[in-house]
Image (cartoon, rainbow, N blue to C red):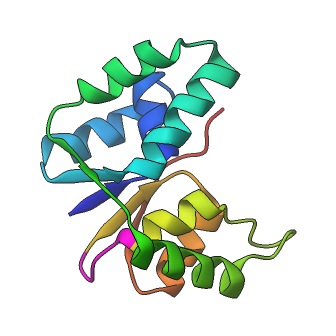
Amino acid sequence: MDLLDASALIALLNDEIGASDVERVIANGDVRATTVQLAEVVDVLARRHGVAPDKARRAVEAIPGLSVIAVGAGEGWRAGELRARHYRRTTCPVSLADCMLVAAAKQRDRIVTSDRALAAVSRAEGFGVMELPPPA
């Protein structure tokens, strides 16, 4: 299964560099994102790109085959542990939201992201990664 980071979803929705890669991942099926990534997508699209939150939600909900993973206490504890272990302000500025994605991942999942810190943490934790080009 492929887990889409907010950066992958934003690239797709804004038709940014990497959007075609995300489209191919979606076409292969079984793509997921956590509720935390959905929140991040709405936040970034609204604050940085001027997209109304309800429009952002409709756009995400229209992505074919995207399933949403609800995160709970177990993932929350694990995300905190991951961030405490990996976060370094200058060399690995992984966000707590990104740690939630890794915490929700299962053994054979692959993380799809353009975020270098998230990619590094995912690899360190034994997950496959599909690195997208960073946004222009």
Left or right: residue 104 versus residue 109 is right
* In the rendered image, the vertical position of residue 39 relative to residue 4, given as above or below: above
Task: Please state the horizontal and vertical placement of residue 14, each as a whole percent of the image.
Answer: 48, 22
Instruction: Give the prevailing secondary structure in the magenta stretch.
Output: loop
Left or right: residue 87 versus residue 18 is right
Task: Please state the horizontal and vertical placement of residue 20, each as a whole percent of the image.
Answer: 34, 33
At 49% from the left and 33% from the top, the residue drawn is 10
**Region of the chain picked out in magenta, as a range:** 104-108
Out of 38 and 73, give the one closest to the viewer. Answer: 73
Task: Please state the horizontal and vertical placement of residue 59, each as a whole percent of the image.
Answer: 34, 20
Q: Quadrant of the N terminus?
A: bottom left
**Residue 105 is a magenta residue:** yes
* In the rendered image, the vertical position of residue 25 relative to residue 125, given as above or below: above
At 43% from the left and 15% from the top, the residue drawn is 54
**Residue 22 is a magenta residue:** no
Left or right: residue 133 versus residue 109 is right
Give the quadrant of residue 66: top left
